Amino acid sequence: MFLKKDTETMENDNVKYGMYEVACKCGHVGRSHYLEIRYPIIAQSGKDAAYRARYFPRVKHDHKDAILSVCKINQQRFSELTEINERDPYLHCTCIQDQNLIDLSDRLLDEKETVYHMVRKDECNKDFYYKKQKLRDPKKYMKHYRDFCA
């Protein structure tokens, strides 16, 4: 394990680890909403902490701005954040029915309209042809028949 414990850093085989607070956008609360949750993370750098937090459960992985902020913290703040997250019922939901029992309306934040929400109506209006024949279901064609025609 760790050889030396310090309030700011920990050493393991000459690699320094720091404690970071990473604020993330968490999802499964609607397409245009998110919850801001702060995770305490032990990592080598702030960049490494942000990378680890991006792939935590409930974080909006596909968003470029899923990580809102990263800052270095001390041991007291680290244990405080750990305790806050242990008491948070949203982080302990195992299914949608559990989540529906929790009132999250006061914690929801509105997301800006961004490129993440793809508009597919333009794609639906476009006609696809194969040798002057109009395709009724271009998705099915691309999936099954594309390899045979090449």
Image: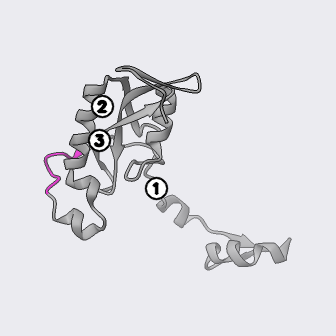
- Which SS class for mark 2? helix
**121 drawn magenta:** no
Q: Residue at x 18, y 45 (%)?
A: 107
Left or right: residue 46 versus residue 96 is right
- Up the image or down, 20 lies above or below 36; here it is above
Between disc 3 and disc 1, whose residue precedes? Answer: 3
Q: Which mark is residue 37?
A: 3
Between disc 1 and disc 2, whose residue precedes? Answer: 2
Q: Residues within 10 Å of mark 3 (few under 14, many from 20)?
A: many
| Along the viewing direction, whichever of 111 and 55 lies nearer the viewer | 55
Between disc 2 and disc 3, whose residue precedes? Answer: 3
Q: CA distance from mark 1 to mark 2?
A: 41 Å
Q: Which mark is residue 78?
A: 2
Q: Identity of the amino acid at label 3?
A: Ile
- Up the image or down, 54 lies above or below 75; here it is below
- Up the image or down, 28 lies above or below 36; here it is below
Q: Position of residue 17 (x, y in %)?
A: 48, 26
- Which SS class for mark 1? loop
Residue contact at pointers 2 and 3, CB within 8 angstroms: no
Q: Is residue 134 visible?
A: no
Q: Residues within 10 Å of mark 2 (few under 14, many from 20)?
A: some
Q: Which mark is residue 119?
A: 1
| Along the viewing direction, whichever of 137 and 93 lies nearer the viewer | 93
Q: Identity of the amino acid at label 2?
A: Phe
Residue interval drawn in magenta: 103-109
Q: Identity of the amino acid at label 1?
A: Val
Q: Residue at x 43, y 21 (%)?
A: 9
Q: CA distance from mark 2 to mark 3?
A: 14 Å
Q: Residue at x 86, y 70 (%)?
A: 150
